[in-house]
Amino acid sequence: MILLDLPGLLFFSTYTLLVLFWAEIYHQARSLPTDKLRPAYFIINGIVYVIQICIWTYMRFSKTAAAIELAELFFSLISLAAAVGFVVYGGRRFPIESRGRQKKLHEVGFVTGICCTCFLIRCVMVAVAAFDKNADMHVLNHPILDFAYYMIVEILPSALVLFILRKLPPRRVSDQYHPIK
C-alpha cells in the first residue's frame, strides 16, 4: 500500500505546484502580495507528507482494515483539496488586456476543467474503495483495469495539460537589446 500511495502524493505535489503558479499570477495581476504563497505551498505539502507518514506508520503497526480505510480516505481528501485548488485559482477572472492574454486564459480554463475532473474522479473512486471492499483500487491481478484507472486519472490529464500548454508565449522584445548585424 505504501508504494502505491507515494506516486499519488508526488502527482498531488506536482499539480498543486501548478495551482501555486496560477495563484502567483492571480495575486500579481490584482497587485496582491505573493510573499506568503510559496511558504504556504511548502507548509501544506509538508503537512500532507507528515500525515501520510503517520498513516503509514499506523498501518504498519495496526494491520487493521481501519488503517487502510484511513489511508484511502486521506488520499481522497487530498485529491478533493487539489480539485478545489484548481477551481479557486484556475476559475478566477483576470483583467483581459489583449487577445493573446484572452487565449491563454481560455487555456487555463481548459486545464482547470481537466485537472479538477481528474482529481474529483480520483477522490470519488478512492472514497468508494475505502468503504466498499469489492471496489479495491489496487487490482494487481487485473493490469488492464489498473491501466484504465491510471490512464483516466493521471496519464490522459497530464498529456492534455502538456498539449494545451505546449505553446509558450513569445519573448518580449526589449528596447535595450539590439543584436549586432
Image: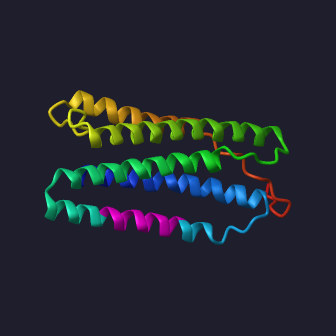
**In this rendering, is residue 35 above or below 105?**
below
Q: Main secondary structure of the magenta part?
A: helix
**In this rendering, is residue 108 above or below 70?**
above
Q: Is residue 142 left or right of residue 25?
A: left
Q: Residue at x 22, y 66 (%)?
A: 57
Please count the marks in the image.
0
Q: Position of residue 5 (x, y in %)?
A: 29, 52
The quadrant of the rendering that contains the C terminus is bottom right
Would residue 1 be seen by someone viewing this image from the given angle? Answer: no
Q: Quadrant of residue 29?
A: bottom right
Q: Quadrant of residue 141?
A: top left
Q: What is the span of residues highlighted in magenta in the rendered image?
A: 41-52
Q: Position of residue 9 (x, y in %)?
A: 37, 54
Q: Position of residue 19 (x, y in %)?
A: 57, 53
Q: Is residue 3 left or right of residue 178?
A: left
Q: Is residue 37 left or right of residue 151?
A: right
Q: Position of residue 44 (x, y in %)?
A: 48, 65
Q: Residue at x 55, y 52 (%)?
A: 18
Q: Residue at x 24, y 61 (%)?
A: 56
Q: Is residue 65 left or right of residue 122?
A: left
Name the foreground residue: 131 vs 4: 131
Q: Is residue 42 magenta?
A: yes
**In this rendering, is residue 141 above or below 173?**
above
Q: Is residue 53 magenta?
A: no
Q: How are the residues colored?
A: rainbow
Would residue 94 be seen by someone viewing this image from the given angle? Answer: yes
Q: Residue at x 77, y 43 (%)?
A: 101
